[in-house]
């Protein structure tokens, strides 16, 4: 039990570090455009990091918890993964490199699990409880097909989104920028497009809503408020609110003078940065929830017959067996609180990289980049994919820069960032493997 408590404490410390490591993701553009002071920006971002507790479910947490097969690992594996993730996060923060805290955690977890499999079984095959022959590399959930044609999961999908997340962010921010630029012209075409988009958004969100009858645990006696505040529905309401707000601005953009347009864009940056902070909190806090859930599951597996207190009554969901997940409310509350506290601590070295070194950012670019980043995070969270908020917002900033000209993006800085992204998972995995072997000497 002592080791389990230590892992939970270290996981929350990692969550805190994640907050100040990734604070720049949400506030870099709003600080660079001087909409808010650095202190105001971190308070703003921290508030919405915590508010995400009421918006998002636990889909990403489930994906992270199943990075390695919990029936085949022990608590030393998870402890080694968390320690490695903390070390790499602190190093990249110190160097001012906006690496991915998400991929650090995934790489650490997977690397320690592989080290454990090699230590226990070696490189040769072994017969598992199911009677089949398995190998050391199978301890990691590399790929699992989606149920009923849904989105597949596994470490390979997470690795794929190292490329796909920034590309999606770049494409979304580029399209939003083009939309805004055309809306500034006094012609009817952009307005027709905007109205059509508003109608399409309303219809899309309407069909995504979960009715009262299908809500597992309604939060209120009232049907209306239960539907309105269901975590699945809130997320889609936010998507609609963001798109409709930008659409409303586009409808009046051409009638504003330069000063009025800039003032409106700065106010909209508050909305876009808040939306991105929500996505940051909802996406990244769930990864730590997943690690804690996996630790509890491993503890139960390695201590059969143990009675768990109610505050640690965690059950991992299993769609194949029809088992629904259970997570005590203190775990998400602690995780969201930790990441919010970390965001309050700031991360000024990375703010400088994100806010000025990639491309010069104005209020216009800030709105486009943060809106695109937020929408990307909401959709990937819906698909239960733990993507990097760092990669997403960096791609969004690059997409904005491309609307000016290709040379507006400082590609030298961007290439350096991409190398950091590529190396994060393998370095974290190797580091976690070494930490595992060291810990194994002292912890049986």
Image (spheres, helix red, strand yellow):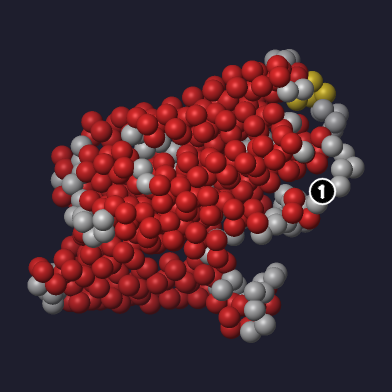
Task: Name the quadrant of the N terminus.
Answer: top right
Q: Which residue is drawn at 65% across and 33% down?
A: 78
Q: Which residue is drawn at 67% across and 74% down?
A: 218
Residue 167 in view: no
Q: Which residue is drawn at 28% across and 35% down?
A: 414
In the image, 252 versus 30, the foreground residue is: 30
Residue 115 rendering spot, x and y as whole percentages: 65, 22
Residue 260 in view: yes
Residue 299 rendering spot, x and y as whole percentages: 77, 38
| Drawn side of residue 186 relative to residue 60, left or right | left
In the image, 260 versus 12, the foreground residue is: 12
Which residue, given by chain and number where applicable, does mark 1 sit on? 308
| Element under disc 1 | loop
Count of numbered circles in the view = 1
Q: Is residue 275 above or below residue 280?
A: below
Q: Is residue 403 above or below residue 416?
A: below
Residue 343 rendering spot, x and y as whole percentages: 42, 50
Q: Which residue lies furthest to the right in this view?
A: 305
Task: Name the quadrant of the C terminus.
Answer: top right
């Amino acid at each position: 039990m002592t080791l389990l408590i230590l892992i939970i404490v270290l996981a929350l410390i990692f969550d805190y570090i994640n907050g100040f490591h990734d604070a720049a993701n949400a506030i870099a553009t709003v600080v660079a455009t001087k909409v808010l002071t650095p202190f105001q920006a971190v308070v703003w971002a921290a508030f919405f990091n915590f508010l995400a507790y009421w918006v998002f479910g636990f889909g990403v947490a489930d994906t992270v918890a199943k990075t390695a097969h919990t029936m085949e690992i022990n608590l030393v594996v998870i402890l080694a993964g968390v320690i490695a993730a903390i070390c790499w996060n602190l190093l990249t923060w110190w160097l001012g490199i906006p690496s991915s805290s998400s991929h650090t955690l995934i790489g650490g977890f997977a690397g320690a699990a592989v080290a454990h499999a090699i230590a226990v079984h070696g490189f040769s095959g072994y017969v598992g409880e199911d009677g089949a022959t398995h190998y050391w590399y199978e301890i990691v959930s590399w790929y699992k097909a989606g149920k009923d044609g849904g989105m597949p999961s596994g470490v390979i999908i997470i690795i794929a989104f190292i490329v796909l997340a920034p590309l999606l962010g770049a494409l979304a921010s580029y399209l939003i920028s083009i939309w805004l630029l055309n809306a500034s012209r006094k012609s009817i075409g952009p307005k027709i497009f905007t109205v059509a988009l508003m109608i399409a958004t309303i219809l899309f969100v309407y069909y995504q809503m979960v009715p009262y009858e299908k809500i597992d645990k309604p939060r209120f006696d009232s049907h209306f408020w239960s539907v309105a505040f269901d975590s699945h529905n809130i997320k889609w309401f936010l998507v609609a609110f963001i798109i409709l707000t930008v659409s409303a601005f586009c409808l009046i953009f051409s009638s504003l003078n330069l000063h009025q347009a800039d003032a409106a864009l700065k106010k909209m940056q508050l909305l876009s940065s808040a939306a991105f902070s929500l996505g940051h909190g909802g996406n990244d806090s769930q990864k730590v929830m997943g690690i804690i859930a996996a630790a509890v599951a491993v503890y139960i597996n390695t201590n059969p017959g143990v009675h768990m207190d109610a505050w640690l009554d965690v059950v991992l969901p299993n769609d194949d067996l029809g088992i629904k997940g259970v997570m005590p409310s203190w775990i998400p509350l602690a995780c969201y609180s930790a990441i919010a506290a970390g965001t309050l601590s700031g991360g000024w070295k990375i703010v400088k990289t994100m806010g000025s070194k990639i491309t010069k950012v104005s209020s216009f670019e800030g709105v486009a980049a943060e809106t695109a980043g937020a929408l990307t995070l909401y959709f990937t969270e819906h698909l239960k994919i733990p993507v990097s908020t760092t990669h997403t917002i960096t791609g969004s900033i690059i997409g904005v820069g491309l609307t000016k000209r290709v040379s507006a993006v400082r590609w030298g800085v961007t290439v350096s960032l991409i190398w950091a992204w590529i190396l994060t998972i393998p370095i974290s995995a190797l580091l976690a493997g070494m930490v595992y072997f060291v810990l194994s000497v002292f912890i049986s």
